[in-house]
């Protein structure tokens, strides 16, 4: 994942958002990877959740 990919940008926004604790727990490995943790392949269901949460965040902030 590069820093210009939409999923990376969405994940950076979500890291600072007020998320449900279960979503934050599900995304914790991805958040850790943003800061030099072990790089991981994101499962499809996690990528879908990132996209859904980011879309929801975008709607709420409009």
Image (spheres, grey):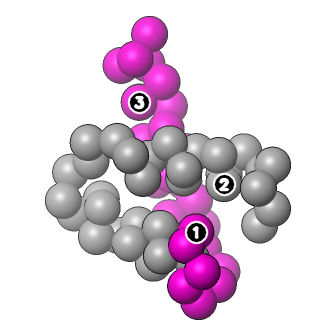
The x, y position of residue 37, in whole percent, is: 55, 85
Mark 1 residue element: helix
The span picked out in magenta is 34-62
Q: Which mark is residue 14?
A: none
Which structural element holds mark 3? helix
In the rendered structure, the answer to whether residue 23 lies left or right of residue 16 reads left
Residue 52 visible, this angle: no
Residue at x-position 26% and y-position 42%: 18
Q: Residue at x 44, y 10 (%)?
A: 62
Magenta-drawn stretch, dominant element (helix, strand or loop): helix
Q: Secondary structure at mark 2?
A: helix
Q: CA distance from mark 3 to mark 1?
A: 19 Å
Q: Would you say residue 42 sits in the magenta stretch?
A: yes
| Residue carrying label 2 | 8
Q: Quadrant of residue 61?
A: top left
Q: Is residue 17 magenta?
A: no
Q: What residue sits right under mark 1 in the picture?
A: 34
The reply to whether the C-beta atoms of the residues labelled 2 and 1 are less than 8 Å apart is yes
Does label 3 or label 1 sit earlier along the sequence? 1
Which residue does the image show at 30% across and 59% down from the upper left? 23
Q: Earlier in the sequence, mark 2 or mark 1?
A: 2
Tell me the quarter of the picture where residue 3 sits.
bottom right
Closer to the camera in the image, 61 or 51: 61
In the image, is residue 9 above or below residue 32?
A: above
Question: Residue 57: x, y in percent?
Answer: 41, 30
The residue beneath circle 3 is 57
Q: Is there a contact, CB below 8 Å, between mark 3 and mark 1?
A: no
Toward the viewer: 23 or 17? 17
């Amino acid at each position: 994942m590069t820093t210009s990919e939409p999923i990376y940008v969405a994940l950076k926004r979500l890291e600072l958002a007020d998320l449900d604790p279960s979503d934050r727990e599900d995304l914790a490995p991805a958040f850790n990877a943003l800061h030099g943790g072990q790089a991981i392949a994101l499962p499809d269901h996690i990528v879908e959740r990132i996209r859904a949460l980011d879309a929801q965040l975008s709607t709420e902030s409009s």
